[in-house]
Image (cartoon, coloured by chain):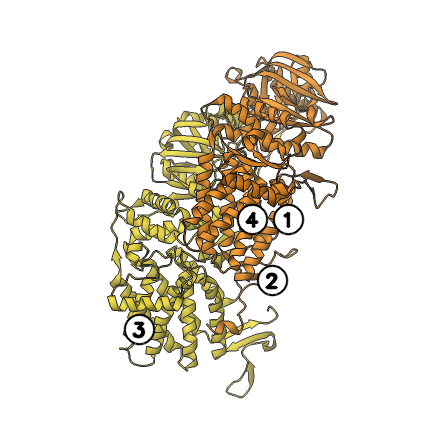
Chain colours: A orange, B yellow
Amino acid sequence: MSTEAFQPARILNQGSTQEKAEGARLSNFIGAIALSDLISTTLGPKGMDKILQSPSNLLDSTITNDGATILGSIQISNAAAKILIEISKVQDDEIGDGTTSVVVLAGELLKEAEKLIHKRIHPQTIIKGFRLAKDIALKKLRSVSQDYSENQEELKKYLKKIAMTIFSTKILTPYKSLFADLAVDSILRLKGSTNLESIQILKKTGGLLKESYIEEGFVLDKKIGVGQPKRIENAKILVANTSMDYDKIKIFGSRVVVNSSSKLAEIEEEEKKKMLRKCQKIVDHGINVFINRQLIYNLPEQFFTDNGVMSIEHADFAGIERLSLVTGGEIVSTFDHPELVTLGTAKLIEEIMIGEDKLIRFSGCKEPSACTIILRGSSKQILDEAERSLHDGLAVLSQMVKNPKIVLGAGCTEIIMAQAIEEAAKETSGKIQIAMESFARALTRIPTIIANNAGYDAEQLVSELKTKHYKGNNTFGIDVMGGKVCDVQKIGVFESLLVKEGMLLKASEATEMILRVDTIMNSAPRRRGMN
Amino acid sequence: MLRYDSSGKPFIIIRDQDQKERLTGSEARKANILAAMTVANLMKTSIGPLGMDKILVDQDGEVTATNDGATILKNMQVENPIAKLLVELSQGQDDEIGDGTTSVVVLAGALLEESLSLLEKGIHPSKISEGYEKACDIAVKHLISICDKIEFDKENCGSLIKAAKTSLGSKIVNQYTDKIAKISVEAVLAVADLERKDVRFDLIKLEGKTGGTLGETELIDGIIIPKNFSHPQMPKQIKNAKIAILTCPFEPPKPKTGHKLDIDSVKKYKELLEIEQNYFKEMTDLVKKSGATLVLCQWGFDDEANHLLLQKELPSVRWVSGTDIELIAIATGARIVPRFSELTEKKLGKAGMVTEKSIGTTDEKMIVIEKCSNTKTVTILVKGGNKMVVEEGKRSIHDALCVTRNLIKDNRIVYGGGAAEISCSVAVNKASKEIKGIEQYSIRAFSEALLSVPIALASNSGLNSLEAVSEIQLKQMKDKKPFLGIDCLSKGTDNMKEQNVFDTLRGKIQQFLLATQMAKMILKIDDIIRPTGQY
């Protein structure tokens, strides 16, 4: 192979680069670790937030500590870092929370792997060890989780605690009990469905976060037509998706040609009549509320007012779908068969005021699962962050109802898993053992980072915690508020098994993927202005 | 380049010499060989169960992580013409066999590397080519003589699963090999026609989905389409569905010839309105009349038509892609109908169960069509923690499917772990001694080159490569056992029969033939001309 040493023949396109072996690994590690370091300061109840400024509009900024949001908005060119961003996104889509921890764990695993590679351990051996360790950790995690599928009453209590744990790392911390109640309440209304769509979150600036509340029924952020009743009892609702401006002729190629202004007037008259006929058909459904996805022009609106029908225009697509869901009416586009159409119903529709805004509230709907959470806050950024946090909580809770398994938080389960791995490592011979130990170390880094972020002597706390666990106190964790080691059951920090499982599996999958790489080939960036 | 014609006048054969860069003779050959070797060396580290992956970043910054040779080469943005040939080579192996795309490149690289020293000895390239040709014949004949046959049928497919496992062993999916190999084999067997020894690949659909882990990959007896019902209030589940497949939109017709329809009176306006309304009614009536209970349409619906469909209790799906439509048509026995008027009951397809399912916390939905009347279509739903894993999972499963298909076509196998290559190398080397002339050298070189794959395999596995390979060579010669190979996973035995590591005979032969052909082709080149300024 001596010829290889001469001069490597250039085979790639101009501008393309190639990184090999150590170089590739180094660039992967650096990228991934930098990313996880960046985000690790947001971990835990006392983690810090980040400001994200959009590159196009400097005034448009987001303040958040939600991992997926942060990672989603930073621009990265490093390949390994991209993989981490991807797992965070998937964790968000699938479970909703743990988006930061999954990246931090992957970063810590890679840090450990880097040390092992320096010790001349082959990446494949490391992968083998990590896999083994992951399986052990997973088994242990599942065995210490508690299943509450039988006991609904208990579950409800724990749901609140889980919600509080989730919210305690977010902006909602001061009012976590309130928001936990909101979240649990709205999730329980869903009765086991994971369809978060029927929970609507409405943000209204003004007021304080703690003034947020849950509104029975459904709230639509739209206006009622002019001169129409503001309050309707026993509403019969027709939800429609049809054009109520001017009804264009859908036959291709048609156009109106007239040779005199009188003809034009005739056609115009006919057009109006056509619209009015349509309105009449709609009214013939025996309704008193008409809600359309598209615009309603003045003429039809007038007609509805005259007939005592409340009309609401321009309810967007999501709004329409939700409305049809909660009121039980179908979305209608043709009006020839009133007898076939299922109308939506609501006991009461009225206009309400929140802050300075007028909203329409539908209460007593057919689908009682519907509810709206009204968020109040003093600025847009706060509201946005509150919404994200609430969404995380709702997502986890909705998955919890399906799979009600609970583990202890506050770093307790991480230590349990780490110790299970260490235990098993003792009985494994070969270099795999070292890799397994590294995996355990990476797991213990998570409570360390959380304690660090809170400003405590993390190493001290974690070592105390470890000793506790060695002595058999398997329910101990770190009380971040008090800065000491304590029984987690007493401080009530619980988490969903799904979140932890997702974190473990995704982080190790991504780590494995990055470790397996020995070459990175970067294509030349697409040239602008060409072709 | 200047030449003189018979009357002594100079004329130019190739214009603009100063703008061209030119390499000739042995220099050209060396440059080519070097380029080919660079590619081969790049691929070497991906061979075997402990081979490494590569990350490819494309022009738009999208990341692909893979260890599939064909994929790496395809996305590498190669510019050098010789390197491009190698990309084609691996593509050829991929199209024909689907597996072994890395080895074929490594082998071709090794053949060229060997030829380098032969060239230095002053052996003419065409002599080298001839020698390689002969050696390749010997190797292929030897492969056929040492191959084994595996037996399987629909119920007893253990041996196929083992072969799929060998193929999956080198990929990221290898922690779930058992499950994924089983899924792949089941998928192939479901669509295979064992009597004709034919497998229609288009009946297996690979659908990827992020979320969960690779271990949650599943085989679905039916088809998945990533769509939802056109109206939110349509039923989410249809039992014993009669499916109408339409390739015409639920909209008024648009004649292709340009035309204008002038409206100049109120009467005409009214008429037109009526016609328009009737269009929609007729369309939905025709569908309803045919007895269909589910409509799949390649095009969109007008709002009004959509609502009429709902009113007539006809759940429907719009914008179904062309390939999906074909697949569903095959699976359910439906005819694809291009016009409403041609829809009859006979043309409807049947499926036992059609359901819309939602996944995760996001609003993603997919429609699963199961229990089709013609069950010979399956979907493999690949899951994984991130997009890249899912993509790599799909590629790996595709390889495993190919291997299984090849075994159904031809059930002869050779043993993996480098066993076949080592055995061939020994045989070729032995044969070389009985051949007169210079060719002997090139035949011997071929036998050396054959060892490149096992050497790469051993060195990727962290073994002392040369030692390991020579040991196996010795053992094979002594014991006459062509199934001894490199013990990559330290399982404690080099008997590949026991380790159940094997490749298809077809794939191996194809590798040898393609690599030899490529080496010969590159050796034949003695002149490279390219315009300068590009480099």
Which three-letter amino acid code belongs to the residue tagged 1?
A: Gln
Distance from Cα at disc 3 to Cα at disc 1: 57 Å
Check disc 4 and report the residue beneath it.
A108
Check disc 1 and report the residue beneath it.
A75
Q: Which chain carries label 4?
A: A
Q: How crowded is mark 4: few (under 14 residues within 10 Å), some or many (20 or more)?
A: many
Residue B170 appears in view = yes
Which three-letter amino acid code belongs to the residue tagged 4?
A: Glu
Q: Do the residues labelled 4 and 2 touch (CB within 8 Å)?
A: no
The numbered disc on residue A126 is none
Q: Is residue A195 above or below residue A63?
A: above
**Label 4 element class:** helix
Distance from Cα at disc 3 to Cα at disc 4: 51 Å
Q: How crowded is mark 3: few (under 14 residues within 10 Å), some or many (20 or more)?
A: many
Disc number lying in front (4 or 2): 4
Check disc 3 and report the residue beneath it.
B429
Which three-letter amino acid code belongs to the residue tagged 3?
A: Asn
- Say whether disc 4 or disc 1 marks the residue closer to the N-terminus: 1
Co-location on one chain, circles 2 and 3: no
Q: In this view, does A19 lie above or below B269?
A: below
Disc number lying in front (3 or 4): 4
Distance from Cα at disc 2 to Cα at disc 1: 21 Å
